[in-house]
Amino acid sequence: MAPERSTGNRIGAEDIRRRKGGVPIVCLTAYTYPIARMLDPHVDLLLVGDSVAMVLHGHATTLGASLEMMIAHGQAVMRGSTKACVVVDMPAGSYETSAAEAVASARRIVEETGCQAVKLEGGVDVAEQIAAIVAGAIPVMGHIGLQPQSVEKDGGYKIKGRTEENIAALFRDAEAVEKAGAFSVVIEGTVEAVASDITRHIVIPTIGIGASGDCDGQILVIDDMIGMTVDRVPKFVKEYANLRDTISDAAARYAAEVRGRAFPGPDHVFSATSGKDKE
Ligand SMILES: Nc1nc(=O)c2c([nH]1)NC[C@@H]1CN(c3ccc(C(=O)N[C@@H](CCC(=O)O)C(=O)O)cc3)CN21
Ligand SMILES: CC(C)C(=O)C(=O)O
Ligand SMILES: [Mg+2]
């Protein structure tokens, strides 16, 4: 198992499971060491989402994520986190084909990162995979509703739960994920009342994103939450900071000072004589 900064009291998947119906579970994505350091004191769960492929690597969809990419970011987040339950997304192509493939991929992720759990997208269609991973003693988080790995199949990011047929399918997916042994489930891009009803219908905590305030917890993509996302931001996002402008302003001031020879100043250079200069 990869070494982790352990305080011995990290939140585990079973701690998350027990929080059904209680104080809302605070979740954010994280992809890097410094962000994990900053978020860890404030959240219950950090998700190393396959959204990293879009948000940090500039791919058009999450289908650009690989097992190697997820493991590298999982390791970075684990190095910066001591308290949160860290969950790593299983990327497209690492679990759909068979339960054996899913178990092998989940094992690799856990062994190489030391994370607490994995997450995969789907309901009835991946119940066998979830059950097999859980049987291998790796906790699994489900992900139903809008499934970004199905963007090509769906022809875009389409909100779910708008037809009776689709609502019935959502309930079947929620029940399948619960029965397969998942410790919680993300409900993404789903009509508010439907996400609320599913939350009351199942006994594992639901984590909403573009879903409902009645879910047992909430998650957002970190870059969206801090106003760092440069591409289109989904409607369900609330920006709690504007790092885009902060960074652009810093770059503009730096550029002006370099061009005007105002930077570096006396504090940012070394003299031959003094040992008291900043290292
Ligand atoms: N930066 C970022 N944040 C995310 O939350 C996120 C990603 N990227 N990439 C992967 C998926 C894609 N997500 C999305 C993207 C767009 C909509 C969206 O535009 N939905 C439409 C409604 C469409 C409908 O009504 O069917 C909207 O108006 O917001 C939803 C989820 C969420 N995920
Ligand atoms: C937004 C969450 C649920 C996710 O799957 C991701 O970031 O990849
Ligand atoms: Mg994801």
Image: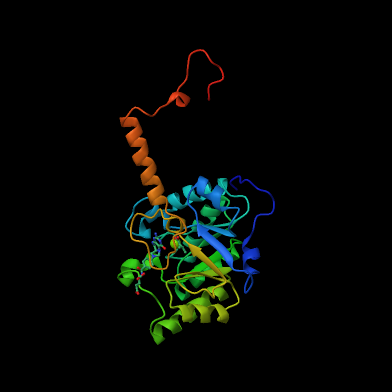
197 or 122, which is in the foreground? Answer: 197
107 or 191, which is in the foreground? Answer: 191
Q: Looking at the image, how many numbered discs can be counted on the residues?
A: 0
- Tell me what residue is drawn at x 69 percent, y 54 percent: 9
Which color scheme did the rendering employ for the protein?
A: rainbow
Q: Is residue 162 shown above or below 47?
A: below
Q: Is residue 65 visible?
A: no
215 or 71, which is in the foreground? Answer: 215
From the viewer's perspective, tell me whether residue 255 is left or right of residue 275: left
Residue farthest along the right direction in this orientation: 8
- Tell me what residue is drawn at x 45 percent, y 65 percent: 98
Quadrant assignment, res 134: bottom right
Q: Is residue 219 shown above or below 111?
A: below
Looking at the rendering, the quadrant in which ligand 3 lies is bottom left
Residue farthest along the bottom direction in this orientation: 164
From the viewer's perspective, tell me whether residue 84 is left or right of residue 163: right
Q: Position of residue 208 (x, y in %)?
A: 50, 70
Q: Is residue 105 visible?
A: yes
From the viewer's perspective, tell me whether residue 28 is left or right of residue 20: left
Q: Position of residue 42 (x, y in %)?
A: 59, 56
- Tell me what residue is drawn at x 58 percent, y 46 percent: 2
Q: Position of residue 225 (x, y in %)?
A: 46, 58
From the viewer's perspective, tell me whether residue 101 is left or right of residue 80: left
Residue farthest along the top direction in this orientation: 273
- Tell me what residue is drawn at x 37 percent, y 62 percent: 233
Q: Position of residue 53 (x, y in %)?
A: 39, 54
